[in-house]
C-alpha cells in the first residue's frame, strides 16, 4: 500500500500533545476534562455537549460533577507526604471532601498501594460509591510513622454536567466510520492520551472522504452510554467503528474483533495488520467502550485497536504509565495502520464483471504485457485477473485482496483500470 | 465448578460392586444376566422387562435363551485342564451342549487362544451361529498332550426371554437424558461392570432433577435394538444420551461425539472434559450401542463416554480385564465428570437481556465492585458481562461458558444474580 | 484401491510419445500444431475443428495463422550463430518475417536471454503484438561480436485457422468429465507434452464408462476460449473437469481446486491424493485453462492437476524442459492417480438405507462374521456399517469414504453387497 501523503502529525508532534495533556486531572466529569477538550480543540474543531447531572441515559443517570483543587496528607512537620500537586494519581477519583486529623491506623483503610510494584502509585476511582482515599507507593507507605497526619481533600461533588466532544469530517455518504477515545483518565499516558493524540492526527489527515468520519472524545462507560442515549437513531448509520486506546506503548498492535466477529471493520483491520507484528483477539464484553457499542441491543460493528491490551503491561493503571512509557515511533505506527484501514474502507467497492464468460482480452485494451512466456507475472496483471474472476457481485475489493493476498492498493488499481476499460461496473 | 455434595458412592464402593458382579456368567440372555440385574437392583430400583424369544424387534428377532451350568475339558487323569468353574471366559458364549471324547486334533477347531498374549484367555461368543468352543491361554494349549479328552458343555439354548432393566428418575420435564450400559459381558471388569457401577452411582446421586433421567442396563446390540423397538415413540423425548463403558481403566476419558456431532450433549461433555486430560473422537458407526441409537432412522443425540476406548488397551476382551485392571480412582473420576455433565445439562438455560442497550448499571444494584481502576477483574463480574452480552436469545448458558471459557457454575451464578435483579428473564 | 487392469500405456510408451512430439514447432495456430494432432490421432481418434481467422469467440477473435520454415542469425563467416533448425525455441513465437543485416547493437532489442540461467534458452511468444525476436542462451550472447549479422525469419502470419481436437468416449450418461491439455507450446516436454501423453493413455484405458469423457487438445487460452464459445450450451453437462499439465516431472502431484472449491471433482482428487505425497492449492485465476473454464460466467467445476506447478521449477519455459526432464515413472504415477480419480467418479453413488432403524442384522444375511468378541474388525464390515449409517440420502459413497478414511473400493464393495442383500437402494 503506497501512501504518498505524509502523515498529518509526526510521532514527535503526537508525543508533545500527550505531554501537554498529561498533568491535567481528568475524570469522568469536571474541569480537567473540559480543559483537556479545549487543548484537543486547538488541533481539531470540536462540538462539545454538556449533559446535566441526573439526566437519564439508557439504564444510567449522569452523575454529579467532581472537581478538585488540592489534596494532601501532611505530617507533624507540615511536610506533604502525599501530595495531589505532585501527581493527581495520589487522590482516588471522585473522592468526597475531607478535612481532619488522622493517625496512620485510621488512615490505612483509605490508602491504596501496589504491594507487588512498591515504587509505583496505583490509579483508583470510586465514581458510584461516595468515599475518599489516597494512592501512594508501597515504599512511601512503609516509611510513614504513626502520625497523626493532617488530611485534606478540597473537592466538590455537586450537580453539574458531563462533557462529551465530537469532531465530524463529512463525507459523500451519510454512513459513518466512528473512532472513539476515552478521555477520563488523569495522568496516564498510554491509557489514553496516546489514543487521543493518534485520533487527532488521523482526523487531521482526512481529506474529502467518502464515508463520514466521527471522532468521539468522551469519558469511558458513562460517556459512551450518554452518547448512545443521545444518538439512538443515528447509530443505524454506523458502517464501522473502533475504540482506540493504549496506542503508544512499544508492544505489537492488537485488534479485538467486534461482537459480530466478521464485520467489514474486522476484515479491514485484520487485513491491514497481517503485514506487521500483531495479535487478533475475539470479542469479549470487557475492555473499553466497545462494551457499550457492542451491547446486544445495539450490536454495532465496533472493534478495538490497541497496542498492548489493557492490563497486559505492568505499567497499566499506575504511575509507570507516563509520557516516558509511550514512544513517538509507536504512535506513528498506530497512525500508519489506521491510515491504511481508512484507505481500505474508502477504496472498498464491489464491482460486476461485464465480460464474465472467459477472460476478456486484456492485451488489445493495453492492460496486459504483450510478450508471453515469461515466468514472472506482474502483480498488476494478477490483480486484474483476481478482480475479474471474483467480481460476481459477491466479493468486494477487500474480499479479493484478502483472498489473493495482494496489496489492497494493487487490487483497487486493477479495478480502476478495468473500470476505465469498461470491463467492470460498480455494483448498484 | 463447585459441587458441595459428596458423591453418592465412593470409588471403593463402586469397585466393590464390580468385584461382586465379576464372577457371574452373563450373556445376552439367561440367568447370569438376571442375577446381575438383581444385584444392581439392590442399589437401585429397576423395572425389568422380559421379551420372549422370537419377538420381532426392528430388523431382528429375540434369540433363544442360553444357560450354562458347567463345562470342562478333562484329561485322561480326570483333571479339568479347561474349567468353566475357574472362569466363565473359558466357554465360548452361546455354545451349544456337547458331551464326548475328542483328541486334541479334533478339539483344535473349537479352541481359541491369543498367540500374541500367551498368558491371557480370550473372550469369544457365537450368538447367531450355533456352534461351541473353549477359550484358553496359549500357554495352556501348548502344554496339552494329544488326548483323548473328555469334553462337556452342559448348556441349554432354548426358547426363553431377553432381559432388559431400566431405572427412571422422574424430572420436571418429560424430556429425557438417557445413560445406557451394556451388561452382557461375562467376567470382564472394565467392559462393562465399571460402566454399570458408575451408572448406579450417578443415578443414586440425582435429586429432583429438571430432566427425566433414564438408566438402561441391557445386553449390547440386541438389547438396544429391543429397547428401541419397544420405545419407538418415546425416543422423541430424548434430549441427550450417552453410552457408558470402559469406565474404570487408568487411561484418560474419551468422548465420542454423536452422529449429529454438535448436539447439546456433545457440547456439554466436551466442555466438561476440557479441564482434564481427555480425547474427543468423531462419530463412527462402530463401538457400543450408540451404533443403534445413532442409526440414521433414529439419529438420536447419543455420544459415548469411556476412558480408554474399546480395543485400545491390551486387556480388552481378555482375562486381563479383571477387577485388578479397574481402579476406584478412575471410576470416581468418571463419576465426577458425569456429575458435572449433569450439572451443566440441569443448569443450562437461555435468558434474554431485558436491558440490552448499553450495559445496565450493575453497581447501583450491588452487582459490581465500587472501586474502579483495579487491573484484576473478578470472575463473577466477567461472567455477568458475558451473560448480559450474549443473552440475545441465541446463546444458552452452556454456549456462554464455552465462549467465555469461564466455569459453568460462574456463568450460571451470574445468570441467577441477574435474574434476581430483574435484568434478564428466561427465554420462553 | 485395487485395479487389476494394467495401464493402457506404460511410462516408457508415454515417454516415447513425448520424444516423438518434442521437435515439432507448435504454436497457437499453424502446421506444427496440426502435425502434433495427427500424431496424437494415431493413438486416439480425434475430431479436429478448424476455426477461421477472425471468428469472434467470446471477447476475442481467432488470430491469424502463423507458420515458419526457417530462421537464423548468421555471422560474417556464414555460420548460423542462432539457428531455428537446432531448436524452435530460438524464435519468438508469432515473429513476423524479417530479412536484413543488423549489427549486434541493432539486434539487441530483439534478443531474449535468461541472465540467471546463462546456459538455457528461454521460451517467448508475441501472439497479439506484431514483432519479431530470437531467444538464446546468455552464454552464446556473451560470445557474439559486434556484427554485422545476416538475419532471417522465414515466417508467415496470415489468415488461416485455429485447430482444436477432441476425443470423446461416450458413456451411459450425457454428463461429461472433461480433461483439457494445452498443446501450443513448441519444444517443451513437461509443459505440456507429458500432459498430452498421459491424457492419451487415460483415454485409451476407458471402457464403457458411466460418464461421457471428453478429452480436449487445444492451444492455451485462445483454444479454450474458442471451445467455450462453440459449446456455450454443452458446458451445462460438465460434471467435472481437469486441466492436465506438467504431468511428467519428478515432483509431487499438485491439485489446484476449482473456483467452487468443494465440487465433486475437488473431493475426488483430494481423496485420491491423500495416499501419496501431494499438495493441494486453492483456486487462483492464473495458471492453465482453468482460468477460462472457471471464469465467473461459466464457473465450471474444473480443477487443475500437475506435478510441480508452472513456474515453480527452474526448467519451466526454458530449453531445460526437454525429454530428459520428464520421466516414465512420473508419467505412470500421474496416470495411476487419474485412473483412481476416474474409478471414484465412476463408482460414486448415493444410496438409501432401507432398514434405517437400528442396524439391520447382517449376520443372518451372511454379511457379518459369526464369531463375536474379536478385537480386530474387518475393513469390509466397517465399510458396511459406514454405508448403512450415512446412506440417508445426504452422503455419496465418496463422502462416506472421505469421512471413514476407508479405501473407496472397500466402501463401494460394501454398498454393492448391501444392494445385493436388499438393504440399500440407489437414490433416485
Image (cartoon, coloured by chain):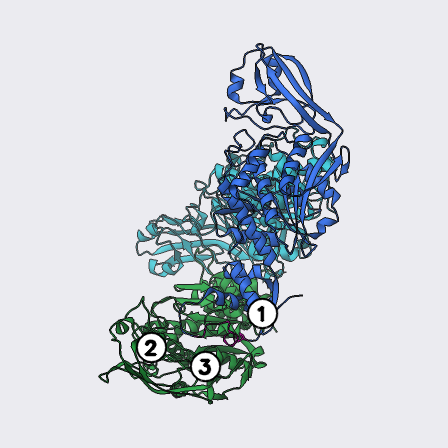
Chain colours: A cyan, B green, C blue
Mark pair 1, 3: CA separation: 32 Å
Q: Residue B7's image quarter?
A: bottom left
Disc 1 target residue:
C420
The magenta-colored residue range is C358-370
Q: Position of residue C217 (x, y in %)?
A: 65, 40
Mark toward the viewer: 2 or 3: 2
Horizontal side of residue A346 vs A71, given as left or right = right
Magenta-drawn stretch contains B412: no
Disc 2 target residue:
B106
Q: Nearer the viewer, residue B357 or C338?
A: C338
Q: Are marks 2 and 3 in contact (CB under 8 Å)?
A: no
Q: Is residue B5 above or below residue A328?
A: below
Q: Position of residue B60 (x, y in %)?
A: 53, 80
Looking at the rendered structure, the secondary structure element under dot 3 is strand
- Looking at the image, the residue that sits furthest to the left is B77
| Residue B273 appears in the rendering | yes
Q: Nearer the viewer, residue B254 or B276?
A: B254
Mark 3 Cα-neighbour bin, 10 Å: few <14, some 14–19, many ≥20: many
Disc 3 target residue:
B218
Say which quadrant the C terminus of chain C sits in. Answer: bottom right
What is the magenta segment's predominant secondary structure? loop
Amino acid at each position: 500500500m503506497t501512501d504518498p501523503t505524509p502523515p498529518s502529525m509526526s510521532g514527535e508532534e503526537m508525543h508533545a500533545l500527550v505531554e501537554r495533556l498529561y498533568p491535567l486531572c481528568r475524570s469522568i466529569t469536571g474541569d480537567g476534562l473540559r480543559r483537556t477538550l479545549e487543548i484537543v480543540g486547538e488541533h481539531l474543531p470540536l462540538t462539545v455537549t454538556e449533559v446535566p447531572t441526573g439526566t437519564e441515559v439508557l439504564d444510567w443517570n449522569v452523575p454529579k460533577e467532581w472537581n478538585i483543587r488540592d489534596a494532601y496528607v501532611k505530617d507533624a512537620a507540615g511536610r506533604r507526604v502525599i501530595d495531589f500537586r505532585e501527581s493527581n494519581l495520589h487522590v482516588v477519583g471522585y473522592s468526597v471532601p475531607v478535612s481532619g486529623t488522622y493517625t496512620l491506623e485510621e488512615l490505612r483503610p483509605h490508602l491504596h498501594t501496589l504491594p507487588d510494584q512498591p515504587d509505583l502509585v496505583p490509579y483508583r476511582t470510586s465514581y458510584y460509591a461516595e468515599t475518599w482515599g489516597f494512592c501512594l507507593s508501597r515504599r512511601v507507605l512503609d516509611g510513614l510513622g504513626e502520625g497523626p497526619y493532617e488530611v485534606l481533600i478540597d473537592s466538590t461533588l455537586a450537580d453539574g454536567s458531563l462533557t462529551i466532544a465530537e469532531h465530524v469530517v463529512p463525507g459523500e455518504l451519510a454512513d459513518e466510520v466512528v473512532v472513539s477515545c476515552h478521555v477520563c483518565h488523569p495522568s496516564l499516558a498510554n491509557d489514553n492520551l496516546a489514543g487521543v493524540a493518534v485520533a487527532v492526527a488521523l482526523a487531521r489527515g482526512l481529506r474529502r472522504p467518502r464515508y463520514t468520519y466521527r471522532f468521539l472524545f468522551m469519558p469511558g462507560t458513562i460517556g459512551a452510554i450518554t452518547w448512545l442515549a443521545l444518538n439512538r437513531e443515528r447509530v443505524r448509520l454506523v458502517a464501522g467503528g473502533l475504540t482506540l486506546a493504549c496506542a503508544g506503548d512499544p508492544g505489537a498492535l492488537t485488534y479485538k474483533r467486534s461482537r459480530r466477529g466478521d464485520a467489514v471493520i474486522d476484515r479491514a483491520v485484520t487485513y491491514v495488520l497481517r503485514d506487521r507484528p500483531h495479535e487478533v483477539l475475539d470479542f469479549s464484553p470487557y475492555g473499553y467502550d466497545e462494551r457499550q457499542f457492542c451491547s446486544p441491543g445495539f450490536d454495532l460493528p465496533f472493534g478495538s485497536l490497541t497496542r498492548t491490551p489493557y492490563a497486559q503491561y505492568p505499567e497499566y493503571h499506575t504511575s509507570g504509565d507516563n509520557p516516558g512509557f509511550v514512544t513517538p515511533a509507536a504512535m506513528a505506527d498506530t497512525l500508519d495502520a489506521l491510515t491504511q484501514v481508512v484507505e481500505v474502507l474508502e477504496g472498498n467497492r464491489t464491482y460486476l464483471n461485464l465480460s464474465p464468460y472467459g477472460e476478456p482480452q486484456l492485451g488489445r485494451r493495453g492492460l496486459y504485457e504483450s510478450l508471453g512466456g515469461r515466468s514472472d507475472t506482474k502483480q498488476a496483471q494478477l490483480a486484474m485477473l483476481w478482480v475479474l474472476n471474483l467480481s460476481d457481485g459477491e466479493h468486494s475489493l477487500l474480499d479479493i485482496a484478502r483472498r489473493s493476498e495482494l496489496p489492497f492498493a494493487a487490487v483497487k488499481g486493477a479495478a480502476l483500470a478495468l473500470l476505465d476499460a469498461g470491463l467492470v461496473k460498480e455494483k448498484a
